[in-house]
């Protein structure tokens, strides 16, 4: 059992990290696109950001360079990530289930971090100076993990109920969505139950995993919990649940991307590169033949061509 | 009540409309429009239209796609759709919007937060067909199936859909049931953009299949590229009209005004929506007066399209959008002006100042900006004297989405109306959370078949509610009221709606731009610039 637990932990972590890197690369390598920001943009000058204004509200803005007040972005991100401000403002009834679920996940991640730290401290300095720290971290890990599991379970159950009971979601709920929530429920039920049975504590499992300690005993229910949670972690980056990655791009590269294309500035060369792309759109008025670049196509006047 | 329609219904082959709306189904309006029974009946589509065109979505038909005659033709159209679908997700073909589109396709959670923000969905009585995610979900399933080549596992994760010509034909129409106002995108907790989905679908249909409503393609962007303006006005005609406007304004205000043309090296090249010159000449006239009195070194351009700021490509076709933006900046480059200032036209603001920002390089990269900060600075500069008591009537302000939510020009217009209009009142919500007037994305100029019925009953309904609420304390005909809409497109939509509901005749609600209010309050000008006459 314990070998399976360790292997699943390694594989889960590896696939999770690998999957996230793959997805980040996919989005980061997409071409530079046209400006499509949405106001309010929080890194605007604070007196403007509060009503959603932009630098276009001032005259002669091009005479000075653009300043970004990144504090506004950080504050907005904090409110969105930890308080789910969007749902609070626009969909209050979904806020509580979603908040419980996400906050539970943050606690579970914190527990994972503490467990890893406790495990490494314990593994490296068993019986040494860091032993009390390892014990403390281990306790934090166990209790945070427990609280996290509880919140995830409650949140996931409420979200599942919403999916099944709300007719507005009917057209938009796929079998996969139900499966995902059940996956979370199953993994966290097992992990949570593992807490109450006679088994090695979580931090000990981390320590064991770091040393590949085969003598450790984990109860089947707790072991199954770890295996399932690892599988879940490996699965997430390959589904729409990786929206924590997508959100970075939807916010920073789309909604808040108001970077000006200043004359002779850095963006101009990116614009020039995009204009060299060669489209193949087939409608006659576009005039694309796979040879002409975007810049050449933009210079065509199809109305004149028709007149000739 | 939400109609029990499913995504699969879009592929129904019986060619029957999927939904039918009655006045009673719609979001209720406040008085004097509170009675559905007294509301206008919808004009049914003509038998000829139903016979010739694909009209199987709802009660109207915006695009007039001819019905294919044979199953082979249908097959070919589906194949062209699929080839366009591939290009929509291809870096060479769609670098312009690929990143936001992909993020929207791959990460929607289906939470429906966006639905609560859409005025069209709400106004329709929450009809499922108009839910912002309905069309997006169709495209999403097509994307996973045909672009990502998903099999059974993908269908299980992302859902499935049956692709056939009826689905494509309905999707064409459905892409023209969204104002592209992006209010839904503002509320999405993931950052998905259902407005963008409608935009991208329109692009696919136009750029690959050559399908777009006549009003925005042949009579819109193509006519502008040919004649210089979608109004059909050539340089000679526009100059004649402006000379006439100058004369009229000079007479009405008692101040001599002459619009300068093609002034080399001017500080400001002003580009109006040429619709103003045709339909609301007092608007360019008021601009000319303000700039003249303030001593601005400005000009208009007589270059092809240099005198018409509209850019319909923004709504449906990236190539047409880029072409028009180029024409505008080329006019400025030829004159060697310091900046282009866009007049009262929301989508022209967005197209030229924001979207085209990543299309222009070198000497074409000329500063492009809104008229609002310039005129706000003039108003507060002390160069012109104002008497706000001349504007002592109820005024409310419509926020054109393209200037506000999509460009961040929110306060300058408010600073002006607060200073010059003692009875100014806001609509709720306003600013970046405003509702579209219902004319956005081309609807204001689309009047084929019975489309105006849909545009007034559904798309513009929320705005009508806001207007009536803003004037609730003075709704009677004894008080003339001014609905200020600093955008030609919005003004066109509001004019048509006020007329449709007789709100000028019965309740004395007049619409107009913002510069008219400014000139009306100038002490130097003969009183009564705003004439309180319907036009
Ligand atoms: S677009 Fe956004 S708000 Fe709408 S259903 Fe998808 S995730 Fe939710
Ligand atoms: S863009 Fe506007 S009209 Fe279109 S779906 Fe979103 S909210 Fe509705
Ligand atoms: S018509 Fe006016 S309100 Fe509507 S989308 Fe355009 S700018 Fe916005």
Image: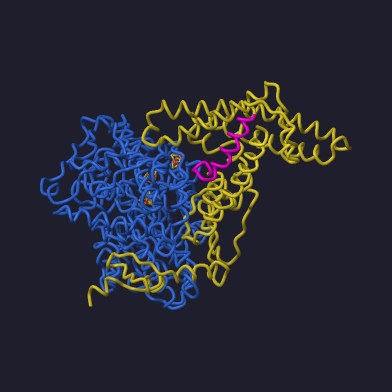
Chain colours: A yellow, B blue
The reply, left or right, for residue A154 in relation to residue B166 is right
Task: From the image, give the main secondary structure of the stretch colored magenta.
Answer: helix
Residue shown at 38% from the left, 76% from the top: B262
Task: Check the image and report above or below for A3 versus B387.
Answer: above
Q: Position of residue A184 (x, y in %)?
A: 55, 32
**B338 or A70, nearer to the observer:** A70
The outermost residue toward the right is A129
Q: Which quadrant of the figure shows ligand 2?
A: top left
The reply, left or right, for residue B113 in relation to residue B225 is right
Looking at the rendered image, the quarter that the N terminus of chain A falls into is: top right
Q: Position of residue A269 (x, y in %)?
A: 53, 70
Report if residue B181 lies within the magenta region: no
**A151 or B322, nearer to the observer:** A151
Q: Which residues are magenta?
A: A223-242
**A195 or B261, nearer to the observer:** A195
Task: Check the image and report above or below for B88 versus B243.
Answer: above
Residue shown at 59% from the left, 50% from the top: A18
């Amino acid at each position: 059992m314990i070998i399976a637990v360790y292997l699943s932990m390694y594989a889960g972590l590896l696939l999770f990290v690998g999957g996230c890197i793959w997805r980040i690369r996919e989005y980061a390598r997409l071409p530079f696109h046209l400006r499509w920001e949405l106001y309010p943009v929080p890194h605007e000058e604070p007196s403007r950001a509060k009503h959603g204004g932009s630098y276009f509200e001032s005259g002669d803005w091009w005479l000075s360079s653009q300043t970004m007040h990144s504090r506004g972005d950080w504050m907005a991100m904090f409110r969105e990530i930890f308080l789910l401000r969007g749902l609070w403002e626009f969909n209050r009834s979904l806020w509580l289930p979603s908040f419980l679920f996400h906050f539970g996940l943050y606690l579970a991640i914190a527990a994972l971090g503490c467990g890893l730290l406790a495990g490494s401290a314990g593994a490296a300095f068993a019986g040494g100076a860091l032993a009390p720290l390892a014990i403390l971290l281990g306790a934090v890990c166990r209790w945070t993990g427990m609280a996290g599991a509880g919140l995830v379970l409650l949140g996931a159950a409420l979200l599942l109920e919403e999916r099944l009971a709300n007719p507005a979601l009917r057209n938009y709920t796929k079998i996969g969505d139900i499966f995902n929530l059940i996956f979370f429920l199953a993994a966290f039920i097992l992990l949570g139950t593992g807490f109450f049975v006679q088994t090695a504590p979580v931090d000990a499992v981390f320590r064991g995993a770091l040393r590949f300690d085969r003598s450790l005993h984990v109860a089947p229910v707790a072991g199954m919990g770890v295996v399932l949670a690892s599988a879940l972690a490996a699965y997430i980056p390959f589904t729409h649940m990786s929206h924590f990655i997508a959100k970075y791009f939807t916010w920073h590269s789309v909604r808040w991307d108001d970077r000006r294309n200043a004359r002779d500035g850095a963006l101009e060369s990116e614009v020039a590169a995009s204009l060299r792309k060669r489209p193949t759109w087939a409608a006659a008025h576009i005039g694309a033949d796979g040879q002409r670049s975007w810049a050449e196509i933009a210079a065509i006047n199809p109305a004149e061509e028709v007149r000739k | 009540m939400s109609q029990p329609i499913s995504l699969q219904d879009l592929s129904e082959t019986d060619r029957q409309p999927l939904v039918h709306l009655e006045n009673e189904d719609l979001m209720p309006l406040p008085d004097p429009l509170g009675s559905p029974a007294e509301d206008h009946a919808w004009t049914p589509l003509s038998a000829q239209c139903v016979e010739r065109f694909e009209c199987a979505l709802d009660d109207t038909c915006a695009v007039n796609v001819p019905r294919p005659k044979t199953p082979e033709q249908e097959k070919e159209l589906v194949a062209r759709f699929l080839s366009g679908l591939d290009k929509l997700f291809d870096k060479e073909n769609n670098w312009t919007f690929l990143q936001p589109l992909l993020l929207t396709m791959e990460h929607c959670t289906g939470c429906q937060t966006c639905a609560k923000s859409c005025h069209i969905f709400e106004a329709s009585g929450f009809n499922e067909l108009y839910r912002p995610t309905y069309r997006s979900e169709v495209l999403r399933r097509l994307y996973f199936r045909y672009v990502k080549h998903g099999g059974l596992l993908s269908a299980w994760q992302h859902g499935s859909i049956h692709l056939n010509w009826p689905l494509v034909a309905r999707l064409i129409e459905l892409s023209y049931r969204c104002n592209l106002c992006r209010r839904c995108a503002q509320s999405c907790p993931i950052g998905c953009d259902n407005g963008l989905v409608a935009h991208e679908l329109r692009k696919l249909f136009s750029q690959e299949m050559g399908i777009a409503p006549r009003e925005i393609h042949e009579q819109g962007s193509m006519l502008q590229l040919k004649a210089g303006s979608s109004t059909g006005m050539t340089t000679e005609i526009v100059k004649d009209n402006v000379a006439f406007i100058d004369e009229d304004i000079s007479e009405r205000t008692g101040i001599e005004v002459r619009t300068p043309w093609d002034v080399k090296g001017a500080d400001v090249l002003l580009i109006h929506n040429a619709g103003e010159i045709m339909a609301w000449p007092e608007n360019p006239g008021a601009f000319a007066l303000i700039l003249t009195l303030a001593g601005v070194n400005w000009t208009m351009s007589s270059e092809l399209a240099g005198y018409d700021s509209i850019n319909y490509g923004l709504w449906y076709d990236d190539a047409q959008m880029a072409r028009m933006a180029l024409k505008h900046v080329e006019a400025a480059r030829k004159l060697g002006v310091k900046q282009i200032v866009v007049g009262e036209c929301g989508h022209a603001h967005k197209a030229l100042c924001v979207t085209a920002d990543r299309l222009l390089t070198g000497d074409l990269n000329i500063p492009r900006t809104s008229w609002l900060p310039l005129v706000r600075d003039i108003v507060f500069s002390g160069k012109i004297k104002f008497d706000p008591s001349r504007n002592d009537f109820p005024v409310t302000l419509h926020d054109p989405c393209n200037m506000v939510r999509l460009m961040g020009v929110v306060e300058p217009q408010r600073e002006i109306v607060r200073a010059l209009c003692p009875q100014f009142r806001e609509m709720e919500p306003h600013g970046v959370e405003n509702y579209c007037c219902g004319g956005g994305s081309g609807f204001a100029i689309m009047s084929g078949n019975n489309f105006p019925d849909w545009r007034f009953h559904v798309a513009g309904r929320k705005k009508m509610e806001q207007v009536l609420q803003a004037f609730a304390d003075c709704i009677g005909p004894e008080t003339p009221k001014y609905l200020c809409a600093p955008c030609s497109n919005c003004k066109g939509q509001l004019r048509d709606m006020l007329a449709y509901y007789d709100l000028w005749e019965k309740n004395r609600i007049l619409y107009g731009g913002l510069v008219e209010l400014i000139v009306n309050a100038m002490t130097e000008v003969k009183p009564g610039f705003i004439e309180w006459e319907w036009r």
